[in-house]
Amino acid sequence: MQQERCSSSDRPLDPRCMLARDAEGSEDRFGRAAVDFPVAVVLPAGGSGERMGLPTPKQFCTILNRPLISYTIQAFERLSWIGTVVVVVAKENHDLMLNIVQKFNHTKVKVVHGGTTRHRSIFNGLQAFSNTTDSLTPKPKVVIIHDAVRPFVEEDLLLKITLAAKEQGASGTIRPLVSTVIATTSEGYLDHSLERAKYRASEMPQGFLYDIIFQAYQRCSEFDFEFGTECLHLALQYCSTNAKLIEGPPTLWKVTYKRDLAAAEAIIKETLSMSACIIAGSEAEAVELAKTLQKNLNMIETDVISCAKESNTEYLSKTQNFIYISMSGSNFSGVLEMVKCFKDLGHARLYPVVIVWVQLNMTKQSVDSQKTDELTAFMGLASEVIQGNVLLYGIEIDHSKVPEQWERSVERLTQMTVALIRERNAALTGQLLHA
């Protein structure tokens, strides 16, 4: 991951800083090996979003036709080692949250009612696990508490927080202060300022042994419930558990103001176009082209897999962009299988899935593709799958043994592929372009 491109500011300037959405990637496989105990999440989402200045609470504001809280939930649901996500909402938003869970196919979520303050809502969320007879919310070893409006939480950080919580009893995320903190007098004058280098901002996520944080809430005072904001402080004060502090990445910011919605949308859009899966047949020429494309594409992550690979389903579920390479004259069976898999997974439910079908022509005999039966079938398939939110494009490339000519053709193919993925131009679906 290209973390060196990240800015040190409190906003993620480069979407490459975000963790790739790899439901079965190496990070997750490591996570499954390291986390051999039950882990759950509590997302307090009962706030009114007064600072947003909008009638809708910020956690329910939509970005690309999807509520913000759904992105946050997805960040946890994609990790196999996290079991349950308890979402705590105001009573009046209970039905709205249930509709979001159903519409966006969230399978690990339990919705509970919140309280009048943040701490009361978190305690309500923790109490959902105290009923040992409820099989849907088994008691976890470690519970992660996170803000519903921080959608860009990285798996690596979650893993560090979880393991530190198990070892220390509590763990928290910190970030450097970006502004100097000052104290004022009652008359509105400067009293003193703090030395910024000595202090850190406390952020989310935070992790706890469930028994510790639950006991802390059982012991805390009414004053804590009404005016407290820091969970780590409760664990220290009432259970003598001092948290391990872990510095978080610059991407760890929360949607607070209206302008943050636009920033979040820009990041999500850009991230969608920054990964691809290249599927190639067994022919040597197709494999060679796939590897060359992998080097040329400037994306966060580009995987190359064989169309005969048994575990393709995990790759088909982790990205929105696919490049399917076959020899010219091949039928659509591979693409049809992909589309069926997308339908079964509900993968195209939220965003269009892009398939760029690359036909590698080895004969050098150019034909008028507009008049062939193949093009007719291709256009028909594209018209059919677009109804299921799948955008199908075609590019034909002639193989050449002349290195300079082949490099130019592959470069044009790369440029056309990137343009189709990033623009997602529905008007071009079904056309067979030539590289």
Image (cartoon, grey):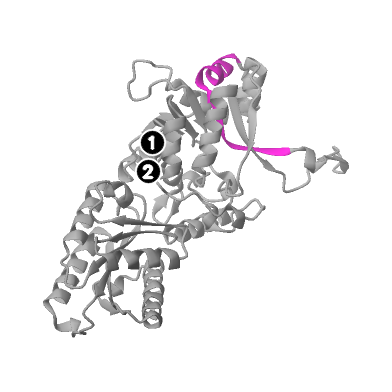
Residue 269 or residue 308, whichever sits in front: 308
Q: Nearer the viewer, mark 1 or mark 2?
A: 2
Q: Residue furthest left?
A: 373
Query: Who comes first in sequence, dot 1 or dot 2?
Result: 2
Segment tinted magenta in the rendering: 200-219
| Magenta stretch contains residue 32 | no
Q: Is residue 379 left or right of residue 86?
A: left
Q: Which residue is mark 2?
A: 24
| Distance Cα–Cα, label 1 vs label 2 | 8 Å
Q: Residue 28: name its quadrant.
A: top left
**What is the x, y in percent for residue 238?**
64, 16
Local packing at callout 1 (Cα closer than 10 Å; few below 14, some 14-19, many 20+) is: some
Whether 401 is drawn above or below 145: the answer is below
Q: Which residue is mark 1?
A: 80
Q: State whether residue 84 appears in this view.
A: yes
**What is the x, y in percent for residue 430?**
23, 72
Whether 404 is drawn above or below 195: the answer is below
The reply to whether dot 1 and dot 2 touch (C-beta < 8 Å) is: yes
Residue type indicated by callout 1: Ser
Q: State whether residue 355 appears in this view.
A: no
Q: Residue at x 50, y 60 (%)?
A: 266
Q: Secondary structure at mark 2?
A: loop
**What is the x, y in percent for residue 110?**
38, 31
Q: Is residue 320 left or right of residue 270?
A: left
Q: For residue 409, which numbered disc appears in the image?
A: none
Local packing at callout 2 (Cα closer than 10 Å; few below 14, some 14-19, many 20+) is: some
Q: Residue 135: name its quadrant.
A: top left
Residue type indicated by callout 2: Glu
